[in-house]
Image: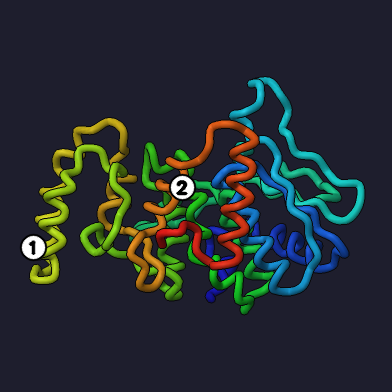
Amino acid sequence: MRDVLTTPMFAPAAPILGNHATAIKESDMVHITGPASLEGVLAIGQLEAACLDIGVKYRRRFFTPRHHLPRDAPAAWSVEGTGLTVIVDVEEATWQIEDLPNNEHVHIVPLQTSVELGSKSRRFGGALDAVVQAGAVAALLAPNGRRVRKLRPYISLGLWLRAALDTNMDPIHSMVVNHLGEEGTLRLVPLPEVSQPAAGMIPGLSERQLARLRKVWPTMDVDQRSMALSELLLPCLSEEELSTPRLEELAWHRMLVGDAEVDLASQVHTIRQGWPEKQEEGRLFASTLLDRWLRTGHLSSSD
């Protein structure tokens, strides 16, 4: 694995995340807590994997996600009286790093950052979400850990699930995904090269035409592929449910781990579709999902 903390997007947050890793490593007991949501599972799982790999004792607690709380209710997390509490606050608004308070506990919240892109080095802003931060801390704790390496491909999914891609291109998501691709953790492939993508992710897409394109895809050159996929997606551009940036990611940059038949975006789509609406059922679902992920290294049973 290549250290994601050395990339420009992590430069403002690297010292803070390094301190988090040190605090976890030096603690006799770590209490890891996050919301009982898919994003909570993705973030907590990274830290639990590292604790298991290096032998740090920990306890897990899911708290109530904000959509189950009254609008004016405070967050449902709390700090334990003993040990080190680590809160992965995936639902918190994005913070400026200089505004972070000094706490005795670890509180991982989305952090504002920026990167330079393009030949003119234009600066673009974005956020380091709690999932990718948890993944960076896990890599610091156990860079060669068996579980950490298995869960590594999933560190970009918090960014994928955020609303940023629903309006504009998210430069942080793109850089994280490209980093994972360059280090060999992920393969980025166009939609026709995914054997079993989840249906219903792209409104207006003809599944029958996609199946036909998949059959002839290996015989096409680069220009033919580009034209054929663009024609397939043309009706989807008039659909309002999906932004153009997200559509482009789903068309050209599907994330695959090894020889898996189901891409990561399809996996989280399917899991979200099956997530129970009731609070207690959702908490049990989250716990079962996280246990299986840590045990097998697979987020969904179909990957």
Q: Which residue is more in the foreground, 54 or 105?
A: 54
Q: Secondary structure at mark 1?
A: helix
Where residue 76 sits in the image (x, y, percent)?
A: 73, 34
Mark 2 highlights which residue? 271
Q: Residue furthest right?
A: 82
Residue at 38%, 38% (x, y): give it.
166
Disc 1 marks which residue? 224
Residue 16 horizontal/vertical position (percent): 71, 58
Q: Looking at the picture, which amino acid does disc 2 mark?
A: Ile
Question: Residue 93, relative to residue 246: is it above or below?
Answer: above
For residue 31, side relative to residue 117 (left or right): right
Inspect the image, locate mark 1, and give the three-letter code of the amino acid beneath it.
Gln
Extreme bottom residue here? 144
Q: Is residue 220 left or right of residue 88?
A: left
Give the distance between the C-alpha atoms of the residues marked 1 and 2, in whole angstroms.
34 Å
Q: Of label 1 and label 2, which has the lower sequence position?
A: 1
**Number of marks in the rendered image:** 2
Quarter of the image containing the C terminus?
bottom left
Nearer the observer: mark 1 or 2; the answer is 2
Q: How is the image coloured?
A: rainbow
Tell me if label 1 and label 2 are in contact, CB under 8 Å.
Answer: no
Q: Residue at x 49, y 46 (%)?
A: 125
Position above or below: 176 against 141: above
Residue 279: which quarter of the image? top right
Residue 104 percent location from the top left of the image:
86, 50
Q: Is residue 214 left or right of residue 63?
A: left
Give the camera-side residue of 160 and 34.
34
* Residue beneath the point at 91% across and 47% down: 81
Dot 2 alpha-carbon crowd within 10 angstroms: few under 14, some 14 to 19, many 20 or more? some
Q: Is residue 175 something that shows in the picture?
A: no
Name the residue located 70 percent from the left edge and 40 percent from the top edge: 63
Considering the numbered disc 2 on the image, is that residue within a helix, a strand or a loop? Answer: helix
